Amino acid sequence: MTEPDPGPSREASCEPVEPGPAGPRIRRPGLLLLGAAGRNAGKTTLSCRVLRRLADRFALTGVKVTTVGPGAEHECPRGGEGCGVCRSFGGPFLLTDERDGPPGKDTTRMLEAGARRVLWLRVHRHALHAGAEALLKALGPHEPVVAESNMLRTVLDPDLFLMLRRTDTSAFKATAREVHGFADRTVRFDGAGHDLDLGTLDLVDGRWRLDEPPTAIVLAGGTSRRMGADKRALAVGGVPLLQRVVDSLRPHAREVLVGTSPALASDDLPGTRTVFDRVPGQGPLMGLASCLAASSSDRNLVAACDLPEIPPGLVERLLSEALSGDVAVPRAANGNIEPLLAVYRRRLLPDIERLLAAGERSIRPLLAERDTRWVPLEEFGGSSVLPNLNTPEDLRNWVARRGGAAPGTPDGTR
């Protein structure tokens, strides 16, 4: 089962995630990559469970990647002693087809779990690109793969990257710290089982999908300057606007995060977590980065706090499109887009950090870089724009369209 909602709490300002390793990453559809925060995190246990569940439907290949170096001459670069990996190959990398092995060996366990074959890549850190290219050539373009590695994520872009962590430790080894920002989902392991329902993980049309309920993120860090008062508390249909947006998203989500500035902090709404912008006043991109860092979900349903109407059908379509894309965004026939009612996968976090470091505040450049799925807005209500309430006039017009009486607005009009 997925990790339960921890209940209301206040989240401290989020630390930035490393922008990620430099250099191109090769997109490899059909690759499920499992990394680990530390030793005994249940990585091979999970890979074997996945293989057992799906081996009768798909010819799956298992991959084990062991990266060595750099390290001092008298030290083991993998952090252990006497495993012999460093002395087992003399070149930059060695790729072997593991047909058998001693009981309990990781590659043997994967074969016993139903893998059609298992490849073992032993590679020096400086040769990761070359080793990965050799691995891809051996695999072929359409072979579905379950692979174990942290560092392979620095050179390949899989369908899914799951980071395994033990529940009894918060430590991250160096290779995990380097790539944990790319994790689509952190999976907890208590020594016996994982907090991942394998029924939500599947291969569809050659692509791995994790169909879990998303985290909902409501961005509420603006100053409401044009409204003239805190629009989060503005009564809309008898309900404060922020509460209205939260209530609209809650049926779709496993938990709700409210992203805001420390200067706007107030009591948490019931059943939500407050996440402070790491650097206030830096626009929606900073709010998105801070909340993605606090999220434990692959898919994240993001909405601005000033949207009085959120079509449920549109939300479901966005969530569906994001199962295979990186982000799903509504777009009208006239070209208008709605990046603040969209679904963003957590894997985007290092790219967002890179844009922030370059001084960017808008979300739009991110959409041009990644696999963005555009959803026709007119299919959900017939309008080319979603109503959002930025000014007293916006509020009056929205109420008038709904045929109601306009409430009092900050400028004293009705």
Image: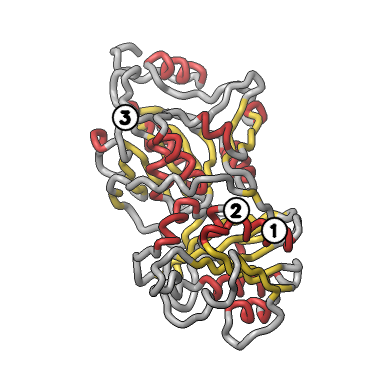
Residue 203 in the figure: left or right of residue 148 = right
Q: Of residues 220 and 137, which is closer to you in this image?
A: 137
Disc marking residue 218: none
Quarter assignment of residue 4? bottom left
Q: Which residue is mark 3?
A: 281
Q: What residue do we see at 58% from left, 69% from top?
A: 122
Where's residue 53, x and y in %? 66, 71
Q: Which residue is mark 1?
A: 136
Considering only order in the chain, which callout, 3 or 2, is on the residue closer to the N terminus? Answer: 2
Where's residue 148, x and y in %? 57, 67
Q: Of residues 9 and 380, which is closer to you in this image?
A: 9
Q: Amino acid at mark 3?
A: Gly
Q: What is the basis of the colouring in this image?
A: secondary structure
Where's residue 379, x and y in %? 67, 30
In the picture as drawn, the residue positioned furthest to the bottom comes out as 103
Could you tell me if residue 376 is visible in this image? yes
The Cα atoms of the two marked residues, 3 and 1, are separated by 44 Å
Residue 52 in the figure: left or right of residue 75 = right
Question: Do callouts 1 and 2 mark residues in contact (Cβ within 8 Å)?
Answer: yes
Disc marking residue 156: 2
Circle 2 crowding by C-alpha within 10 Å: few under 14, some 14–19, many from 20: many
Q: How many marks?
A: 3
Q: Amino acid at mark 1?
A: Leu
Considering only order in the chain, which callout, 2 or 1, is on the residue closer to the N terminus? Answer: 1
When the figure is inspected, residue 278 is found, relative to residue 35, above or below; the finding is: above
